[in-house]
Image (cartoon, rainbow, N blue to C red):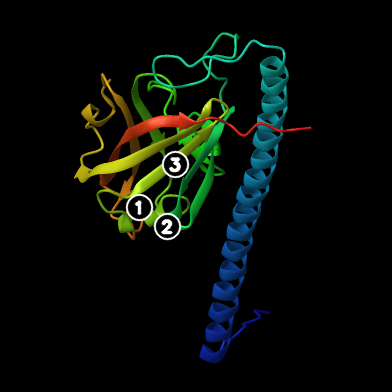
Amino acid sequence: MTLYIHIRPLDLRTMARWLFLTLGISCLGIYSGVFLQREFDQAYASRQFDRTLSDEATAAFAVQKGGAPFTADASGGRKTGRPSPLPATSAIIGRISVQKLHLSAMVREGVAPRTLRVAVGHIPSTALPGHTGNVGLAGHRDTFFRGLKDLKTSDEILFATLDGEFRYVVESLRIVDPGNVEVLAASAGNVLTLVTCYPFFYVGNAPKRYIVTARQVAAPLAPPLIME
């Protein structure tokens, strides 16, 4: 005896709706998980950075009180008496902020996918703030660096590190091919280069890169000293 099951068109439509609903809920869950991970990491990194900044400011005040003030290096950064080794992968570098864009994001070392998922990444082959050269930062166009599309020349970018807060002014905005490595070339001055994918609203792997070049315009502001 053969048993035939007849599925009516209405049943197929119902199944399709449930399938798309399930996919939509799954995508929403994945996005929510990534969003919460990013928010948690940013909050954690911000607290760690501020705590370290506070500890170093207290130590600086103690040294100054003892009559041995910190001095500044050639690029304006504080000399803390310790070596400047290459930062470990995912180490906290500092905080980048652009008031015009309401942007404030923690910067970590490296550009691995897991790093860029939760922070702006410092490109390892480039200089660090406080050192002469080209400081390269990368970020996703759909998270931290979405607002770069609204930047204009002469806009201000701040980069706070343990050596002070560095002030940059935007000099140029351009679109280049992904293989254009000249944008990260070494510089004789103090330059900041921001890199993200372009177009900003492209679906999939974007074919171009959006480059913001800014130049340091003043010696960094020293971290605040805690008076106790």
Q: Are marks 3 and 1 in contact (CB under 8 Å)?
A: no
Residue 182: where, in percent of width, then height? 21, 27
Element type at marker 2? helix
Mark pair 2, 1: CA separation: 8 Å
Tag nearer the camera, 2 or 3: 3
Q: For this rendering, which residue is in front, 131 or 113?
A: 131
Element type at marker 3? strand
Which amino acid type is marked by label 2?
Answer: Leu
Mark 2: few/some/many CA within 10 Å (<14, 14-19, 20+): some
Residue 175: where, in percent of width, then height? 21, 46
| Sequence-earlier tag: 2 or 1 | 2
Q: Which quadrant, please, contains the C terminus?
A: top right
Mark pair 3, 1: CA separation: 14 Å
Q: Is residue 32 left or right of residue 163?
A: right
Q: Which residue is mark 1?
A: 148
Vertical placement of 176 versus 3: above or below?
above
Q: Residue at x 57, y 20 (%)?
A: 88
Which amino acid type is marked by label 1?
Answer: Leu
Which amino acid type is marked by label 3?
Answer: Leu
Q: Is residue 99 left or right of residue 46?
A: left
Q: Residue at x 58, y 87 (%)?
A: 11
Q: Based on the displayed image, in which of its 4 quarters is residue 25 positioned?
A: bottom right
| Sequence-earlier tag: 3 or 1 | 1
Tag nearer the camera, 3 or 1: 3
Q: Which residue is mark 3?
A: 158
Q: Are marks 2 and 3 in contact (CB under 8 Å)?
A: no
Q: Which residue is mark 2?
A: 101
Q: Residue at x 67, y 46 (%)?
A: 43
